[in-house]
Amino acid sequence: MQMFDPYAVLDLPRSASVASIKAAYRTRARMTHPDRGGEPAEFMVVVKAFGVLSDPAARRLFDETGRVDEDGARSHRQGVATILAEMFDTAVSTALSLGLPLQRVNFVEQMASAVRKQSAEAGSGYRRLEADLAALKALRTRIRRRDGQPNIFVQRLDEQVQNKTQELVDAAQRQALLETALTELSNYDSEVELFSALEAEAPAATP
């Protein structure tokens, strides 16, 4: 049985940058998408490969062990679908409340704009968390106890560092979801094509 290799699927070197991964995914997704004449099974392999390489934790796991976190990849894909579905519902509700003719609204572009905004905010939040974590670690090195007994302040800081580190991991995952959603939107010319694809992928979420 041949081992699944996301780099091989997207024809990428292991040193590929995030931008290169996105570009390769866009190209392969357009070539293999069922709505464009591709094979559904091949398209899902491409989707899985991008899900692994666009998630920092999943990519690191594969790089270090050669293993793919199947549950993590599936969760990542479902998270992207949830983001897009919620944004679509919001966009439609907004258009209806404003009395706009739905057939004239470019929902894909509206959703892409919303994702870009959220992605930028997520990036700013991630950088703030990085700065906070660095400051906490620096403070930890300054607080010393002369008698060698347990340092309660360092213990408190260790808890804060642990919590902040988890926040950083969560923020990175959120940013990866948004980046994947934005790349997904760029593959489709209309919301009809987009959501028919998401519906077609739904059965793959069940083991």
Image (spheres, rainbow, N blue to C red):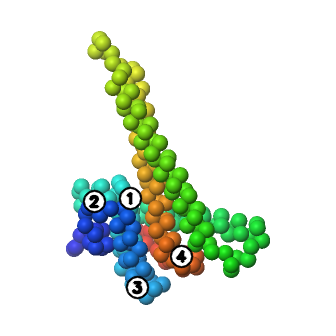
Residue in the foreground of this view, choosing between 170 and 19 = 19
Rendered-image quadrant of the N terminus: bottom left
* Residue 20 picture location, percent across and down: 34, 67
Can the viewer see residue 44? no
Secondary structure found at label 1:
loop
Rendered-image quadrant of the C terminus: bottom left
Q: CA distance from mark 1 to mark 3?
A: 25 Å
Q: CA distance from mark 4 to mark 1?
A: 21 Å
Secondary structure found at label 3:
loop
Q: Quadrant of residue 176?
A: bottom left
Residue wearing tag 2: 62
For label 2, count other residues whose C-alpha is less than 10 Å away and answer few (under 14), some (14-19) or many (20+).
some
Can the viewer see residue 49? yes
> Mark 1 is on which residue type?
Asp
Q: CA distance from mark 2 to mark 3?
A: 27 Å
Residue wearing tag 4: 194
The numbered dot on residue 55 is: 1
Q: CA distance from mark 3 to mark 4?
A: 15 Å
Residue in the foreground of this view, choosing between 21 and 79 = 21
